Image (tube, rainbow, N blue to C red):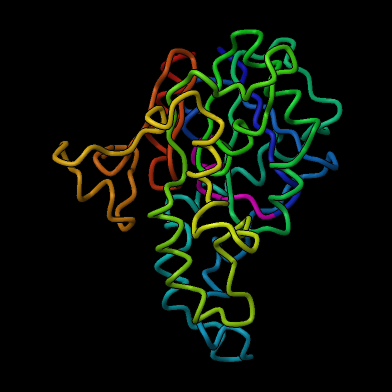
């Protein structure tokens, strides 16, 4: 049995990327340890659970319970069920603090994502987690990162080299195509908070997409070609790139996962089953 540490923010993480990963790793016989900033159990992004908050009428007392766009974009039933089950697990109810987290006795580090700025900024920008990620790579642990979790890794700079731990590695992450599509779908319907799907926004003078996950991760790499996409013409290309299909425990066709040595990466919640299985296989 291997032990996997999963650091998460106190709030607003993606429920699929955390709960499905937990579910897959547990089913494969691994032990999971959680860490949050405060040491209290974390809370997922409620919009990704309920779907409420992405439709133009979401703030209305009665109509707000009706979800259309939100229903399509929220976590699917399998992920919501996994999240509810995970919430009552002893490991989830008793996380350690980020500041107290140790890699001693740990075999793998899994970095999930999320996009809502309120909770994710403290996670992606955490010096404590940056040092933890650098230590994990230095120790040669199995490291897995998905979606904005890859951005956390990209911002983790090894003081010995002055470079990101991803420098010289092949990776994927949330692509600008997926990020921009979700943003375009919701910035009009969620008119009171148009940038819900943009954790970081461009400053004046920066080109569109400069602060996207893909662009920032790519700037941390040795070669821009080290950021990997689904290649056109590859099997199930349209399924993998549509942003509509998600993988399941028995169907990995929609997923895209990049494995580079002991490092595993994926793009978005639709890759999570295959992503967690790839980490499990490494362990």
Does the rendering let one see residue 84? no
Residue at the image point whose x is 52% and y is 85% from the top:
56
Residue at the image point whose x is 57% and y is 44% from the top:
148
Q: Is 81 within the magenta?
A: no
- Position of residue 242 relative to residue 51, above or below, is above
- Position of residue 202 relative to residue 170, above or below, is below
Depth check, front residue: 155 or 122:
155
Does the rendering let one see residue 247? yes
Q: Position of residue 156 (x, y in %)?
A: 68, 28
Q: Main secondary structure of the magenta part?
A: helix
Is residue 266 toward the left or the right of residue 154 in the image? left
Quarter-of-image position of residue 235: top left
Quarter-of-image position of residue 76: bottom left
- Position of residue 169 relative to residue 77, above or below, is above
Residue at the image point whose x is 40% and y is 63% from the top:
181
Q: Position of residue 135 (x, y in %)?
A: 71, 15
- Position of residue 108 relative to residue 199, above or below, is above
Is residue 258 toward the left or the right of residue 199 in the image? left
Is residue 10 toward the left or the right of residue 225 in the image? right
Q: Position of residue 25 (x, y in %)?
A: 50, 27
- The magenta region covers 12-21
Is residue 260 toward the left or the right of residue 14 in the image? left
Marker count (numbered): 0
Query: In which quadrant will I find the N terminus?
Result: top right
Depth check, front residue: 197 or 21:
197
Depth check, front residue: 211 or 27:
211
Residue at the image point whose x is 55% and y is 24% from the top:
166
Q: Position of residue 49 (x, y in %)?
A: 55, 61
């Amino acid at each position: 049995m291997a032990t996997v540490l999963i650091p998460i923010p106190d709030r607003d993480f993606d429920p699929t990327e955390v709960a499905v990963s937990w579910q897959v790793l547990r089913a494969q016989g691994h032990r999971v340890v959680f860490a949050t900033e405060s040491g209290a159990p974390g809370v997922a992004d409620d919009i990704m659970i309920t779907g409420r908050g992405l439709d133009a009428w979401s703030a209305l007392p009665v109509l707000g319970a009706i979800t259309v766009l939100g229903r399509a974009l929220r976590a699917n039933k399998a992920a919501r069920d996994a999240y509810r089950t995970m919430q009552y697990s002893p490991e989830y109810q008793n996380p350690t603090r980020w500041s107290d987290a140790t890699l001693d006795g740990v075999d793998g580090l899994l970095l999930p994502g999320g996009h809502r700025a309120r909770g994710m900024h403290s996670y992606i920008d955490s010096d404590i987690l940056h040092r933890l990620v650098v230590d994990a790579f230095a120790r040669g642990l199995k490291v897995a990162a998905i979606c904005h979790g890859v951005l956390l890794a990209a911002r983790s700079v090894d003081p010995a080299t002055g470079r990101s731990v991803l420098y010289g590695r092949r990776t994927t992450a949330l692509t600008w195509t997926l990020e921009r599509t979700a943003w375009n779908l919701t910035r009009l319907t969620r008119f009171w908070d148009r940038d819900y799907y943009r954790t970081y926004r461009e400053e004046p003078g920066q080109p569109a997409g400069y602060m996207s996950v893909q662009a920032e991760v790519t700037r941390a790499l040795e070669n821009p070609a080290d950021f990997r996409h689904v290649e056109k013409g590859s099997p199930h290309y349209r399924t993998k790139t549509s942003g509509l299909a998600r993988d399941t425990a028995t169907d990995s066709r929609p997923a895209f996962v990049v494995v580079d040595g002991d490092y595993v990466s994926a793009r978005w919640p639709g890759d999570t089953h295959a992503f967690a299985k790839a980490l499990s296989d490494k362990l």
